[in-house]
Structure formats: structure tokens, C-alpha cells
Image: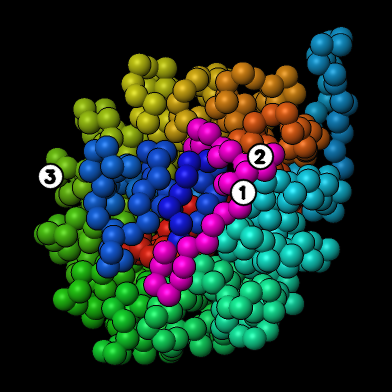
Amino acid sequence: MPEVPPYSGPGGQAEPDPARSGGPEADPVPGTTPAITLTPGTTPSPSGGRTPATTPRGRVSSHRKGCGGPALERWEYWWGINKDSYLWSPRRIHSGPTVVKEFDLGKGDDANVVLDTVAPTRAALMADLLPVCDSALESGVCDTRIAAILSLGKLKHSSVLTKLLQSLRDPCPTVRASAAIAMGIHGDPMVIPILSDIVADSKSGRMIVKRSSVDLPARCYAAAGLGLTGSELALEPLLKALSLPAKFIDVSLSAAVALGALAHPEAVPVLARVVMSGSSERRLRAHALAALGRIGDRSVLGLAHKYMEDTDADIRRSAIIACGLLAEPRDVQVVQSLRTIAEQGRDPLSCNWALIALGEVGGPQSRKSLLRVLHTETSSRRVFAALGLGIQHFDGVGDPRDVQLVRRVFLDVRSASDKGGLAIALGLMNDRDAIPHLLALVESRSGPELRGHAVVALALVDAFEAEPLVRTVLREHGKPQLSWDTARSLGRLGGRTTVRALVRGVRIGSDQEMELHGAVLSLGYMGDQSAVESLCKLALNHKTSSLHRVSAIQALGFLADRAGTSSAVPRLYELKRHCNYGLQFPALNGFMSFL
């Protein structure tokens, strides 16, 4: 994996990673894609690279060409942070006993293989995944250990807690931080006092990590872990963390984000006081305001509306996020304020987020502004307007007439970036009439980013007839972003035939890094238990590259996400969904990089 600058947030000191200095697998994993971005402290770039953690004051500057990816005001960045809410959909899988006749490639005809598409149970997955993770935890590569730790957390079984506790003492700081997140994903009530002591840097917390003091990254990620537990017991330690001394502001900021993920109504009064307090740090006020929106208590809608006029741009942006999540079409004044910002505002991020907020609020007045921007703007702002209309349709409240309007703009636009965003909007609108145009884009000589967006759009409209073409695209070489988009899309489109083909590919292997990587991730996203055996063999194969081993462990983690449910968005995504990514800090960058 590419080298990552060490964590250097306020009050914390960077620590060396022993895995980088030697050992049997100490080399960084080469050629990763966004789907393999595990190391906390970096921000995932929608174009496939990594972006610097923060600028000196905690604000993130716009990225220019050659500096790591699109600017924050581009639609690709918003989609990269929030897409999982839309892509992680119910699968065509069922629960129950599987009927699988194993086949040995190269030995006879496999034409009569019976391969049902069945989600694994956690109990069945445990027996296969535990040996894989035990082996991975002995690896000299941090990313391999991180992948194992996250997958163990997703199993949600009491037997793995000891392994997670031991990982809190790992010599690598990023592994320790990941163990705290994994404990939160696990969610057992017994992890709450452990994470609470780590957040507080108490005597007990220091004993847990076996250090003279708990390092700042571990405290931040332990706060995030508390938010992921979803337990009322996590509320008190998170609220206490909001008032830590200024030198530990990163912990307080992490606690604010975690409270948004926890979404407990009793946090509302405390967060509201933080927002209104003139003595609170401005970044904390902004993230507390966004957390109020994510909790969803409409009693603070008036407060959020008030701060849409604040002199601080970051607080205004958080207010826009909150109003989009809290307001309804009947909230006339709030809708009008959002419309004014969307149509007349000068701050690109605020304008774009106001367009998304109007999509979330819905209603005829919101639609008017979205259509006006769609038809009058020539910049990428029109893409946000189309995405806002797409969100309305995705939520089941869109106007059918809008689909044809967006499709017309999609066909006329020449910018590759804008066309990709409009393709995503058509996907959100479930525009099946756009399928021939999307297929033509995938088959064209367009750039890999645009073709990848077309593939995702096909998945969003459940264009199952496109599955053979999408599977072909997966085999293209040297295009990491296209490989990731295709893998993710096959997770929605693929059925029995796809599973068989991908299992075959994993068993045979490939000389092309990204081809095998994409196949492995696709099997994980599809959530079919028939892939478990092949993924485990790949993960345990020390002769293959670290990239493929990590990919296989991640895919097994995706299977654990699917176990027991076919539709719920994994809790891990709650840390970044609807966050104010214009106001980043090192730990938030890490939250956004996790899978």
C-alpha cells in the first residue's frame, strides 16, 4: 500500500510502524484502489488516489490537477463519501441451506453444477474466517492485520473479542486504531467500558493498551467505535469527550461525529448547547451541528436554519447538511433559504450541498430550484441538481417528468465528468430507458472514470442484462478505478452464472493484479457463501501478493456484513455518511477511508 504520512494531529505524536522496517511481508502493498484504502489518516480520492490529511488549520484546500484528485466541490467527492447508502441494496440472495456441488476446474465438465445463491450465516462463516484472520494477524504488513481485525469485528461473535483486545496493543498505531473501530462494529456491551477508558486516557485505558498514555489516534478511533455500537451506554462517555481540553480537540471532534452515528436523542440538548456556545471551538460547533441533523430530531430545525446565515462558512455548511436531513416540504422558510443558497450562493460547497439538501427535502418548491439550476448552469453545479432530482426519485417522491429532462442533458453534455454524474443521477432515477446509452458508454473508448460511472449507473437501475458486459470489463488491465466500480456493480447485478465465473477466476488466479483483485471484491460484495472456500484459500496463500490476500480478507468481511441481512447498510458507513467533509481533521480522514 502506498506510504502514508504518520498521524500528527494536535496532542499526538507519530509512531513508527515496525512492519515498514522489515519482516517477511514488510513491503507496502502495491497498486491499491479506493476499495483497499485501509490505513487511517488519509482521505479517499474519488479518482483512486489519496489526498493529504489536512491543511494546517484543519481546513481542506481544493485539489487541483495533479494534486491527488477532484476538488472538494466536485460531485465525485460527494458521491465517493455517500454512495454506499445507494449502492448497498437488497441482494437476490435467500437464507437457508445451500445446495452446492463442488467442481474441480480442469477435471471434467462443470456444466451440471448446482450452485445456489445463498447468504452465509455468521456461525458458518466463523469456522472458515477465524483461521484466516489468525494467520493474517501474524503478518508483518499492517494492512493485512487491519483487514483481519475489521472482518473479525463484523462477525459479531463473543469469541473474537480477545483477539480485538490484543490488537489494541499492536506496535502499529493504525492497527490499534482499527481495533477500536472493530470493537465498535462488534457492538457487544462489554466493549463499551473498554473503549470509554481508552477515550478518557484513564489509568484503566493505559493498562488496556499497555502504554504510559493512550495515543491520540487510538482515543479518536475509540470514540468512533463507541458511536458504532449503537448502544445507549456509549452516550455518557461520548458527551464527556466533547468538553476535553483544547489540546485534545481531535478527540472531541471524533466524539461529535460519533454522536451523529449513534443517533441517540438524548445527545440533542448537549450538542445544541455546543453549537450555541461562543466559547466552543468553531470546528466542534460545526461538527456538532451536522451531528444534530444526522440524529434526526426536528426540534432543532429552527436552530439549524438560524446558522445557515452564520459568518463562519463551515458552520453554514453543517447547517445546510442538517436542514436537508431535518426539513420537510412544509417547512417553507427553510426550503426558501436552501433555494436561495442553491441558486444564488457564491460558496461552491454550500451551493452544491444545498442542492443535495433540496433533493432530500423534496416537494414542488425544491424541484423548481433543482430544475432551474439543471437548465441554467453550465458548471458541475448542474450535476448536483441532477443528483438532487435523483435522490427524490430514489426516495420515491420524484416527478416522473424529470427523468426525461435529465436524460436529455446527459445526452447533450460533452464534459466527461458531468456526463458521469448525470449517468449516476439517471441510475438513482431508475431510468431503464437510459440503459442502451449507458451500455454504449461502457463499450466506448471513453476514459475509465466515465465508463466506471456508467457501469455503476447500470447497477443502480438493476440492468441485469448488462451483467455479461460488466463481467468482461472486470478483466481490463491497468484501470484501478474502473476495476473497483465494476466489482461494486457486480455485487448488485451478479447471479449464479457470475458467481461461478468469478470463483473460477479466483481459483485459477491471474497475472494481472487488478483483474484478480476485482474478482475477489465482487464475490465479497455479492455475499454468496459459495465463494467462502476460494476466498479463504487465497487469503491463506502466502505465495500470492499482499494485495490479493488483503482483498480476500476484505471480501470475507463483506460476506460477514451480508450475513443475517440482505439490505442493511453496514454500521461502519455511518461515520462518514452526511458528514461535513469540507472540515476535516486527521481522524475523520481515516473514518472516510475505512470500508
- Whichever of callouts 2 and 3 sits on the residue coming sooner in the sequence is 2
Residue 244 visible in the displayed image: yes
**Distance in Å between CA atoms under marks 3 and 1:** 54 Å
- Look at label 3 and name its amino acid: Thr
Magenta-highlighted residues: 8-33
Q: Amino acid at mark 2?
A: Glu
Task: Name the colouring of the figure.
Answer: rainbow
Q: In the rendered image of this protein, does residue 70 appear above or below residue 149?
A: above
Question: Is residue 496 visible in this depiction of the protein?
Answer: no
User: Which residue is tagged 3?
Assistant: 376
Per the image, the residue denoted by label 1 is: 19
- Residue 143: % across, % down: 60, 47
Q: Splitting the image into 4 quarters, where does residue 112 fall? A: top right
| Sequence-first tag of 2 and 1 | 1
Going 64% across and 79% down the picture, which residue do you hit?
206
Q: Residues within 10 Å of mark 3 (few under 14, many from 20)?
A: few
According to the picture, the residue beneath numbered tag 2 turns out to be 25
Q: Residue at x 22, y 61 (%)?
A: 350
Residue depth check, mark 2 versus mark 3: number of the one nearer the observer: 2
Q: Secondary structure at mark 1?
A: helix
* Label 2 crowd bin: few (<14), some (14–19), many (20+), radius 10 Å: some
On the image, the x and y values in percent for residue 468 come to 57, 20
Q: Residue at x 87, y 25 (%)?
A: 102
